Amino acid sequence: MLVAFYLRWRDFLHAPFNPSDIWFILDKIPNGNVATYGQLAAMAGAPGYARVVGNILRQLPSGSGLPWHRVINSKGKISFPEGSSKYLEQHRRLEQEGITFLNGKVNLRILPTTRA
């Protein structure tokens, strides 16, 4: 358990961006669009840091108002466990914005992704 904690924070502490960089980019994702964790990392100037972006979003302050629900994984899927309350909330919010799912996935090829 301690090793996993260390590895997560080691990457976080050595990332070439900080949480506010990711929050700034996240805030620019328009309604009805999604971005992947990897796209956010690339937009922050650090391709390959998708997991760090995920850790930053996991620690997003509650009540921030930032559109965390617009971030999905590279397979076009919601990363929360299927059927969990967070999964259902993210799925509901995306559908309310006009995002459609087929077999639990967003088709990233036809969906306009954002370029913050």
Image: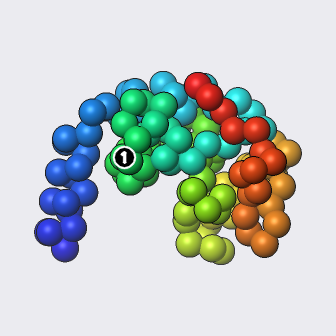
Asked where in the image residue 115 lies, by quadrant, the reply is top right
Determine the residue positioned at 80% across, 61% down. Answer: 101
Determine the residue positioned at 82% across, 66% down. Answer: 102
Q: Residues within 10 Å of mark 1 (few under 14, many from 20)?
A: many
Q: Position of residue 6 (x, y in %)?
A: 15, 59
* Residue located beneath label 1 in the image: 49
Q: Position of residue 72 (x, y in %)?
A: 60, 53
Q: Is residue 37 above or below residue 78?
A: above
Quarter of the image where the C terminus is located: top right
Residue 52 vs residue 115, the one in the foreground: 115
Taking the image as shown, residue 56 lies to the left or right of residue 105, namely: left
Taking the image as shown, residue 59 lies to the left or right of residue 27, namely: left
State whether residue 59 appears in this view. no
Name the secondary structure under disc 1.
Answer: loop
Quarter of the image where the N terminus is located: bottom left
Determine the residue positioned at 50% across, 48% down. Answer: 37
State whether residue 68 appears in this view. yes
Residue 50 vs residue 26, the one in the foreground: 50
Count the numbered circles shown.
Answer: 1
Residue 112 vs residue 87, the one in the foreground: 112
Taking the image as shown, residue 63 lies to the left or right of residue 98, namely: left
Amino acid carrying label 1: it is Tyr
